[in-house]
Image (tube, rainbow, N blue to C red):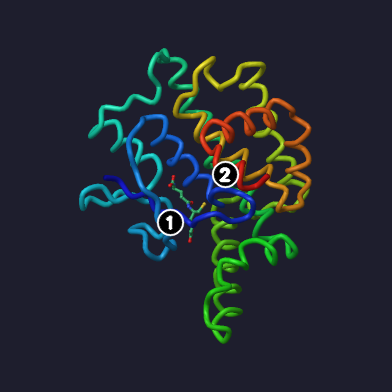
Amino acid sequence: MITLYGFGPFFGLPDPSPFVLKTEIQLKLAEIPFGKARATPRDAPNGKLPYIEDDGEVIADSTFIRDHMERKYGADLDRGLTRDMRARAWATERMLEDHLYWAILHLRWADERNFAKGPARFFDTLPRERRDFARENARRRVLESLHAHGLGRHNKTEIEDLGHRSVAALSALLGNKPYLMGPEPCGVDATAFGMVAALLTPWFESELRRYAESHRNLVTFRDRMLAEYYPGFLQKAA
Ligand SMILES: N[C@@H](CCC(=O)N[C@@H](CS)C(=O)NCC(=O)O)C(=O)O
C-alpha cells in the first residue's frame, strides 16, 4: 500500500503544495489505493515534498511517482491521448511547474504579509526560541532559490507580468473544455489543478491571484476538480 507524504492541509487547501495535490489526484485518477501522512521536506530523500513509500520503496518527485504508478501498476494517465496531445500535456506541465510555480512561490514568500500569514505558520510548532530563526532561514533559502531560478531577479511588476502570460496561456489551452485535453481528466489536469488551486486560494492577497480570478474558466475548472476529487474537503470548508 502506498503512503503519500505531504504537508497536510494549510492555507485553505487540502495541501499547500501544488505538487502534493497533483500526485494525490494522479493516484486517484489511476485508482491506486493509498494513505496520506504528514512530513516535512527534511524527511524527503531530495528535500522536497511529495514523496511516496510503496512496500519499502521510497520515490521522490511527482514526475517519478507518476512514472512508478505507470510502471508498477500499469496506470496510463494519458489514456486515449494522441502523441501530439501527450506532447502538449508535457509542455503545459513544464510551463506550470517550471514557470508559474515560481511566481506563486514569490507571492507567498517575498510579500511580507503573505509570508506572515502563510509559510511562517509552518514553524508554529517549533519551540519558541527556535521559531524566528527557522522562519527567517527558510525564507532566505526560498528567496535564494528564486534568484537561482532567475524569476527572482525581476521586480514584482515584471514577475506579475510573466505570471500573467502563463495564466493566460493555461486559460487559452483549457478554453471551453471541462478538462485540458477534452471531456475526460488526464495527468496534466492534476498538475493544473494543483497550480490553479494554489494560486486562487483567498488565503493570499496578490495581483496575480486577481488576474487568475478574471479567467472564469480557470475558476470553474478548480471548482470542478475540487468537487470531484476532494468532496469531503469542500463539505468541511462549507
Ligand atoms: N520537482 C518536484 C518539486 C517539489 C517541490 O518543489 N516541493 C516543494 C513544496 S511545493 C518543497 O517541498 N520545497 C521544500 C524546499 O525546497 O525546501 C516535484 O515535482 O515533486
Residue drawn where x is 51% and y is 35% of the image: 229
Task: State left or right for residue 77 relative to residue 125.
Answer: left
Which quadrant: the N terminus? top left
In this rendering, the answer to whether 130 lies above or below 48 is below
Instruction: Indicate the position of residue 14 as horizontal and vertical percent values.
Output: 55, 48
* Residues packed near mark 1 inside 10 Å, few (<14), some (14 to 19) or many (20 plus): some
Residue drawn where x is 46% and y is 24% of the image: 186
* Residues packed near mark 2 inside 10 Å, few (<14), some (14 to 19) or many (20 plus): some
Location of residue 192 by image quarter: top right
Rounded to the nearest whole Å, what is the CA distance between mark 2 and mark 1? 24 Å
Location of residue 9 by image quarter: bottom right
Q: Secondary structure at mark 1?
A: loop
**In front: label 2 or label 1:** 2
Q: Secondary structure at mark 2?
A: helix
Instruction: Indicate the position of residue 94 as horizontal and vertical percent values.
Output: 50, 35
- On whether ligand 1 comes within 8 Å of the CB at mark 1, the answer is yes
Instruction: Indicate the position of residue 19 as horizontal and vertical percent values.
Output: 48, 45
Q: Which residue is mark 2?
A: 233
Q: Which residue is mark 1?
A: 48
Q: Amino acid at mark 1?
A: Lys
Location of residue 73 by image quarter: top left
In this rendering, the answer to whether 39 lies above or below 149 is below
**Of callouts 2 and 1, which one flags the residue occurring earlier in the amino acid sequence?**
1
On residue 210, the disc is none
Q: Amino acid at mark 2?
A: Phe
In this rendering, the answer to whether 74 lies above or below 44 is above
Q: Nearer the viewer, residue 84 or 77?
A: 77
